[in-house]
Image (spheres, helix red, strand yellow):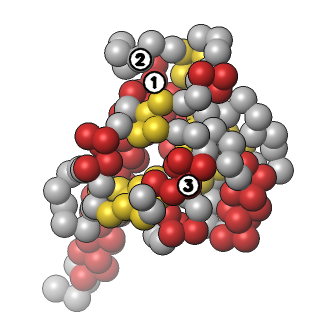
């Protein structure tokens, strides 16, 4: 029995790793689907609505999220515009971005990004806990209850300062909102 114990441990670690990756993979897909849903349920000011036929989503951090967004944007036939997904760093130029997804965990870095785009019509999204209170418009909340859906928090005050309008139906689905 003792000879087989290391084999059982390796199998257990491998299985836990595989199932954990599957869960993470599902989470990424759900988050990407929600970002696409946000595009369909948000109005930008006319001059910043992606005047040409391209809508730009910039992603800071979470390189694996870029691929999921690209896959969904390429297959969603209900989108009226071409979606361009860019993987950017904090030092890059965000002009032309309609959405910035911030997956970077360095809070000082994120604060710099928020300061640079303050009051501009850019929808900011993160999955980092607590950032909706500090200037991100949409915070995706972890699905700890296994419901298979994305919970979210909306900072309506920042949304309005940015000149954006998320549909009231979607706002009603938010787990929590800040501002009026």
Residue at 81 percent across and 44 percent down: it is: 92
Q: Label 2 belongs to which residue?
A: 79
Nearer-N-terminus badge (3/1): 1
Q: Position of residue 84 (x, y in %)?
A: 60, 24
What label sits on residue 73 in the rendered view?
Answer: 1
Q: Position of residue 44 (x, y in %)?
A: 54, 30
Q: Which image quarter is the C terminus in?
A: bottom left
Q: Circles 3 and 2: CB distance less than 8 Å?
A: no
Check disc 2: other Cα within 10 Å, few if <14, some if 14-19, many if 20+. Answer: some
Alpha carbon of mark 2 to alpha carbon of mark 1: how far?
8 Å
Report the mark closest to the observer, 3 or 2: 3
Q: Which image quarter is the N terminus in?
A: bottom left
Residue at 51 percent across and 69 percent down: it is: 133
Alpha carbon of mark 3 to alpha carbon of mark 1: how far?
26 Å
What label sits on residue 158 in the rendered view?
Answer: 3
Seen from the viewer's position, the closer of residues 70 and 172 is 172
* Left or right for 98, reference 156: right
* Left or right for 64, reference 170: right
Check disc 3: other Cα within 10 Å, few if <14, some if 14-19, many if 20+. Answer: many
Alpha carbon of mark 3 to alpha carbon of mark 2: how far?
25 Å
Q: Circles 3 and 1: CB distance less than 8 Å?
A: no
Query: Is residue 114 visible to us here?
Result: yes
């Amino acid at each position: 029995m003792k000879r087989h114990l290391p084999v059982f441990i390796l199998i257990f670690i491998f299985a836990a790793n595989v199932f954990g990756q599957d869960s993470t993979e599902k989470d990424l897909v759900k988050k990407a689907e929600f970002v696409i849903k946000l595009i369909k349920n948000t109005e930008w000011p006319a001059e910043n609505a992606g005047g040409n036929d391209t809508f730009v989503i910039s992603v800071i951090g979470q390189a694996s999220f870029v691929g999921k967004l690209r896959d969904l944007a390429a297959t969603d036939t209900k989108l009226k515009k071409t979606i361009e997904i860019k993987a950017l760093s904090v030092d890059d130029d965000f002009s032309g971005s309609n959405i910035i997804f911030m997956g970077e965990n360095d809070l000082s870095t994120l604060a710099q990004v928020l300061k640079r785009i303050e009051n501009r019509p850019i929808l900011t999204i993160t999955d980092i806990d607590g950032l909706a209170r500090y200037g991100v418009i949409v915070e995706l909340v972890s699905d700890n209850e296994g419901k298979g859906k994305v919970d979210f928090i909306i900072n309506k005050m920042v949304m309005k300062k940015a000149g954006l309008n998320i549909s009231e139906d979607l706002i009603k689905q938010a787990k929590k909102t800040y501002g009026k």
